[in-house]
Image (spheres, rainbow, N blue to C red):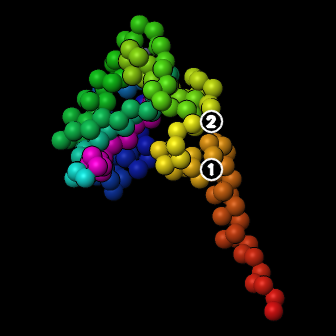
Amino acid sequence: MIIREHCAPGTPRNPDGRLPRLAWPQGCLVQWGERGLVFGPSGGEDKIVAFFEAFPADPQTFLRGEGETVEAAELAAWFQWMKISECPGHSFETRGSTNGGGFCRHCNLFASGVFPASEDTRPLEAQPLLARLFGGDPTAFERALEGLDKLIDEPPAPPSQ
Ligand SMILES: [Zn+2]
């Protein structure tokens, strides 16, 4: 288990030296917080909860547990991890995702790159904002950011008059 730097014991966000309570596997990155924002349903209230996030390396995935306390959130993430660990055999389905990612029907594991990425055929307003902006090209967003960095570093000369 690797604790993210900003959660390390003795840092301003962890002055009490909190450590995860459960035996997360080797190479699994973990982080947590007392106050995570959860967006409410459309028209509903957003709420603030404690959260615990784990990024296991094998299989590579992302787990997030939420709860009244960080301990409860860690336990919620742990139950997800146990379900994945005890899966009889992953069997993926897209659940409407078109970016190549899939979810296991048995344990709910999310894995990227298990399906060929395809054009998003949903109406434009139903597609995620980044896909709308960058047409599903996974490198386009990074290239756009690089372009912005370059503009900041080397602003174009003002038009001559
Ligand atoms: Zn599975």
Q: Is residue 82 above or below residue 141?
A: above
Count of labels in the image: 2
Q: Earlier in the sequence, mark 1 or mark 2?
A: 2
Label 1, label 2: how far apart the Cα atoms are: 12 Å
Please give the range of residues in magenta: 28-42
- Look at the magenta stretch and give its main secondary structure: strand
Q: Quadrant of ligand 1?
A: top left
Can residue 110 be seen by looking at this rendering? Answer: no
Residue 82 sits above or below residue 34 on the image: above
Q: Nearer the viewer, mark 1 or mark 2?
A: 2
Tag shown at residue 119: 2
In the rendering, at what x and y percent does residue 68 appear?
18, 41
Where residue 66 appears, as percent x and y from the top left, is 26, 38
Q: Is 33 inside the magenta-drawn segment?
A: yes
Q: Residue at x 52, y 43 (%)?
A: 123
Determine the image quadrant of residue 104.
Answer: top left
Residue 22: image tag: none
Image side of residue 118 versus residue 77, left or right: right
Amino acid residing under circle 1: Phe
**Label 2 is placed on what type of residue?**
Glu
Q: Secondary structure at mark 2?
A: loop
| Picture quadrant of residue 112 | top right
Judging by the rendered image, the residue that carries numbered circle 1 is: 134
The x and y percentages for residue 81 are: 36, 23
